[in-house]
Image (tube, grey):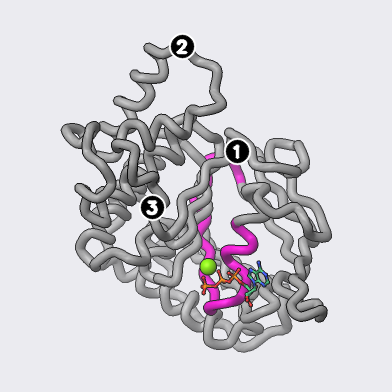
Amino acid sequence: MQQDHLAVHAVTKSFRINGAAVPVLDGIDLSVASGQFLAVVGPSGCGKSTLLRLLAGLDTDYRGEIEHDGARVAAPSLDRGIVFQEPRLFPWLTVEQNIALGLLNVSIDAAARRRAVAEHIALVGLTGFEKAYPHQLSGGMAQRAAIARGLVNRPGLLLLDEPFGALDALTRQQLQNELQRIWSHEKTTMVLVTHDVDEAVYLGDRVIVLSSRPGRIAADIEVTVPRPRERSDVALADIRSLVMDALEAPRAIASITVPVGRPIAVPAPQPLREKVAV
Ligand SMILES: Nc1ncnc2c1ncn2[C@@H]1O[C@H](COP(=O)(O)OP(=O)(O)OP(=O)(O)O)[C@@H](O)[C@H]1O
Ligand SMILES: [Mg+2]
């Protein structure tokens, strides 16, 4: 039985712009089980990156509770990796030096450090490019290096903010497959923010749809399609339609589990947070 290891309770967040409070997240309740792959979608500006920064502990100015493995998130932690849309590699460091930065505050000896870096270079398919500098990499390769840096100290939780947003469609699909392989190999809990509904449904065990700002959870849709998944699977297409409906009419759906093999009926609009059985 999986245990909840990320618990978000009644999280509300505002920014102050020109002296006025701008609400960005409103009453976010979320519980993520260990090893789960959670995808988060929502309109631009609804607070997805803000939520991820709160989960990472990069921003602690919020109301509500965020707990990771039973402890309040009060600062960044080695047990929470983060990958951003742009790779954010240091141009003067090689691939292996950039990845080793993920071990900066980890007390292990030099041999273990080298081994961990080499293993993660292999894990993301960058073997042979250890000594390359970021300007010698393609966009996809640079993002692989960023993923390796996020994973190298084996965090329990990896947070990904649009990690493939800047890549072409083919590279994006390749990296989605890589991420899925890494996730099943490493058993890391993943929270992936994406604009791409196909990506969310293909990768997620569960898709959270946020409403427009202030972001609220408009839908929580379980993707019960077994893995390995076929992108062309009609069951994924049906779940994609549910996610699209929730994005377009965010007050329509709250919590949906679609049993595999059962026809899906899109529920009629309901008040926010009512449970809908399909
Ligand atoms: N440091 C900040 N100061 C003030 N306002 C901010 C700050 N960071 C974000 N915001 C505001 O918070 C809102 C949510 O921003 P956020 O970056 O979380 O959105 P997002 O859902 O990730 O959008 P996108 O899909 O475009 O990346 C926006 O209205 C933005 O202007
Ligand atoms: Mg964002």
Q: Where does label 2 land, which residue?
A: 109
Dot placed on the residue nearer the N-terminal end, 1 or 3: 1
Q: Position of residue 17 (x, y in %)?
A: 74, 77
Q: Nearer the viewer, mark 1 or mark 2?
A: 2
Look at label 3 and name its amino acid. Pro
Q: Dividing the picture into quarters, in which one does residue 113 lie?
A: top left
Q: Quadrant of the C terminus?
A: bottom right
Q: Where does label 3 land, which residue?
A: 87
| Tag 3 secondary structure | loop
Image point (75%, 43%), residue name: 74
Dot placed on the residue nearer the N-terminal end, 3 or 2: 3
Q: How many marks?
A: 3
Nearer to me, 221 or 101: 101
Q: Where does label 1 land, which residue?
A: 2
- Asked if the magenta segment contains residue 181, the reply would be no
Q: Is residue 3 left or right of residue 149?
A: right
Look at label 2 and name its amino acid. Asp
Q: Crowdedness of circle 2 by 10 Å Cα count: few (<14), some, many (20+)?
A: few
Q: Is residue 65 left or right of residue 211?
A: right
Q: Is residue 93 left or right of residue 5?
A: left
Image point (20%, 36%), residue name: 129
Vertical side of 184 occupied by 116: above or below: above
Distance from Cα at disc 3 to Cα at disc 2: 27 Å
Distance from Cα at disc 1 to Cα at disc 3: 31 Å
